[in-house]
Image: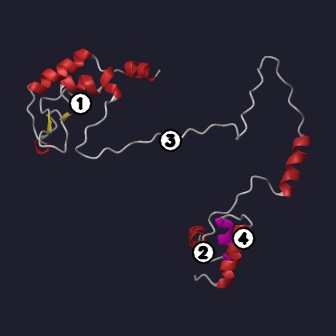
Amino acid sequence: MSWTDERVEVLKKMWGEGQSASVIAKELGGVTRNAVIGKVHRLGLSNRVTSTTAKPAAKEKAKTQAKAKPAAPATPTAPPKPAAPAPETMRVTPPAVRKIIPAGQPLPPQPSANEISPEALAKVSEVEKTAKKISLMELTEKTCKWPVGDPATEDFWFCGLAVKAGKPYCEAHVGVAFQPMSSRRDRRR
């Protein structure tokens, strides 16, 4: 199937009328919905204005249906629903912006570091003094995979002590990495 000038004109006309790609594909015949969408994008027609108003016939039908339905009696115990704010008054919050830090640069202070118990941090610092300090290639399923240091430097290593059953870290690092659900819930409040 080739896009002749006549077929392109039909496509432009139907697209401008707000017809869907599926309807246009059926009308043209011999093309798929995706082919119509691709041609629309190649022609630069994809930014059509979509109307939020219904067609006049649909408006009339909706009005007659609304008149035909009797109003439901209000229940005295149900409180009235608050009206939704108009779109103009709704606030849109921008997504959080993440800053990418180049390798070798120190990370900014992490908020979770302040929330870890001092006992757990003391235990971690003691364990890291006795750690095996292994490289990535020496890691196994039985060695603690807790990273220590900056991966961009020569001083980077993994703990390497025996792991706690079912976890990827040793007992001390499990205490820091896996915190009880209740304490995480409390921090969010």
Residue 129: % across, % down: 10, 25
Q: Nearer the viewer, residue 61 or 3?
A: 3
Q: Hey, what amino acid is under mark 3? A: Pro
Pointers 2 and 3 in contact (C-beta within 8 Å): no
In this figure, which residue is indicated by the disc labeled 1? 167
Q: Hey, what amino acid is under mark 4? A: Met
Pointers 1 and 2 in contact (C-beta within 8 Å): no
Magenta span of residues: 21-28
In this figure, which residue is indicated by the disc labeled 4? 14
Q: Nearer the viewer, residue 70 or 84?
A: 84
Q: Magenta-highlighted stretch: main secondary structure?
A: helix
Crowding at label 4, few (<14), some or many (≥20) Cα neighbours within 10 Å?
A: some
Residue 90 is inside the magenta segment: no
Q: CA distance from mark 1 to mark 2?
A: 54 Å
* 170 relative to 184 in the view: left or right: left
- Of marks 2 and 3, which one's residue comes earlier in the chain? 2
Disc number at residue 95? 3
Observer-side mark, 2 or 4, equals: 4
- Of marks 3 and 4, which one's residue comes earlier in the chain? 4
Observer-side mark, 3 or 4, equals: 3
